[in-house]
């Protein structure tokens, strides 16, 4: 079995965080911006820890200045994802970075991204949908502007609303207004929690934001009553093991709780988060899961079915993806 060829679904991918470093260097050169400080000698992104990672991420993003730049980014990211067998992907996009959360500007960025995604689907068969994401450390007021952009463009392509950024700042309830606005617009909801925050951060996201998926959520393992609640309520975790190991949430793959969560009945899925930052790909995630926990074709098929059930896209799109999964042997 070739792990790179297995059809995969990815529910947790930050668009700017998926930008290959060479792509960002190229844009910086075109725009005469000096970004040399954010790269190591070998060309990869350089950061010391999670909070520094967020500032390097924002520096890299600063050279994405137009709808055309975002279209080029979508093309580059989907080409790479398709090469790793990804057939369906949901990406986080932040209106803060796309026209400063002005609804008119946001629409232009969105159309450019959608056009690029349509071209990639025609060329590589990969399907992309967007989740508008507010950034926790930018504060609740900016989040409201992002939620307004999300609500104005909710539909077939923008399927969800979420929150990323520094979990150390603010509380989920500070963002409840934005999540209510998104929910009323028909958007599905997810929130980063339980990556840096402990079990209480997961409970807060569930209770205060009423999300159906949690980005990461892995630290729920520290409270087995919460694990059982996740299982009973059918909450899906967007688990990004390679991200967690590279950022030091867990020291080694073998110590990552994905397997324990799954064994206790939690719906887990697998994603890369910000692949070039964490030196990973969907193939690498699968290789490490095979090595650390002995996962094989049947396990990966089950993970894909879980992701398909939790995907925010419409039923026709799900049927197309289901067909891609069934076309591949998994016994
Ligand atoms: N933004 C990009 N990657 C992130 C992560 N892993 N956690 C929180 N915010 C992020
Ligand atoms: Zn993330």
Image (cartoon, rainbow, N blue to C red):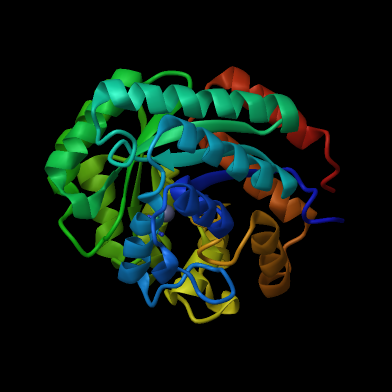
Using residue 324 as the reference point, say whether residue 242 is left or right of it. Answer: left
Q: Position of residue 159 (x, y in %)?
A: 43, 27
The picture quadrant where one finds residue 220 is bottom left
Residue 54, x across and y down, in percent: 34, 62
Q: Is residue 57 above or below residue 221?
A: above
Residue pictured at 70% horizontal, 42% vertical: 82
Residue pictured at 45% horizontal, 53% vertical: 28
Question: Which image quadrant: the N terminus?
Answer: bottom right
Task: Note whether residue 22 is visible.
Answer: yes
Q: Is residue 183 visible?
A: no
| Position of residue 270 measured from the top left corner of the image (x, y, whole percent) | 57, 54
- Quadrant containing ligand 2: bottom left
* Residue 120 in picture, x, y percent from top left: 66, 30
Q: Give the residue displayed 67% in from the left and 69% down from the top.
A: 288
Residue at the (50%, 73%) spot, across then down: 246
**Vertical relation: 220 (above or below) 85:** below
Quadrant of the rendered image containing residue 125: top right
Along the viewing direction, whichever of 270 and 61 lies nearer the viewer: 61
């Amino acid at each position: 079995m070739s792990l790179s060829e297995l059809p995969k679904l990815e529910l947790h991918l930050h668009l700017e965080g998926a930008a290959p470093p060479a792509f960002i260097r190229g844009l910086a050169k075109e725009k005469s911006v000096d970004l040399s400080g954010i790269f190591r000698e070998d060309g990869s992104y350089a950061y010391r820890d999670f909070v520094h990672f967020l500032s390097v991420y924002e520096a890299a993003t600063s050279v994405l200045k137009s709808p055309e730049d975002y279209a080029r980014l979508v093309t580059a990211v989907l080409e790479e994802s398709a090469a790793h067998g990804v057939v369906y992907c949901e990406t986080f996009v932040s209106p803060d970075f796309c026209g400063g959360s002005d609804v008119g500007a946001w629409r232009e960025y969105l159309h450019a991204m959608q056009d690029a995604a349509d071209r990639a689907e025609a060329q590589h068969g990969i399907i992309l949908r967007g989740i508008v994401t507010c950034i926790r450390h930018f504060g609740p007021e900016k989040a409201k502007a992002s939620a307004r952009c999300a609500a104005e463009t909710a539909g077939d392509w923008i399927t969800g609303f979420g929150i990323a950024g520094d979990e150390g700042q603010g509380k989920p309830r500070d963002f409840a207004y934005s999540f209510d606005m998104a929910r009323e617009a028909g958007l599905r909801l997810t929130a980063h929690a339980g990556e840096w925050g402990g079990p209480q951060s997961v409970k807060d996201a569930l209770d205060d934001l009423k999300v159906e998926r949690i980005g990461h959520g892995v630290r729920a393992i520290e409270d087995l009553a919460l694990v059982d609640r996740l299982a009973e309520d059918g909450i899906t975790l967007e688990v990004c093991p390679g991200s967690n190991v590279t950022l030091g949430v867990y020291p080694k793959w073998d110590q990552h709780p994905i397997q324990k969560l799954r064994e206790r009945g939690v719906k887990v899925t697998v994603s890369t988060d910000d692949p070039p930052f964490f030196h990973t790909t969907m193939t690498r995630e699968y290789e490490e899961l095979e090595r650390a926990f002995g996962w094989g074709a049947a396990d990966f098929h089950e993970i894909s079915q879980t992701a398909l059930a939790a995907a925010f896209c419409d039923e026709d799109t799900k049927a197309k993806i289901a067909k891609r999964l069934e076309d591949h042997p998994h016994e």
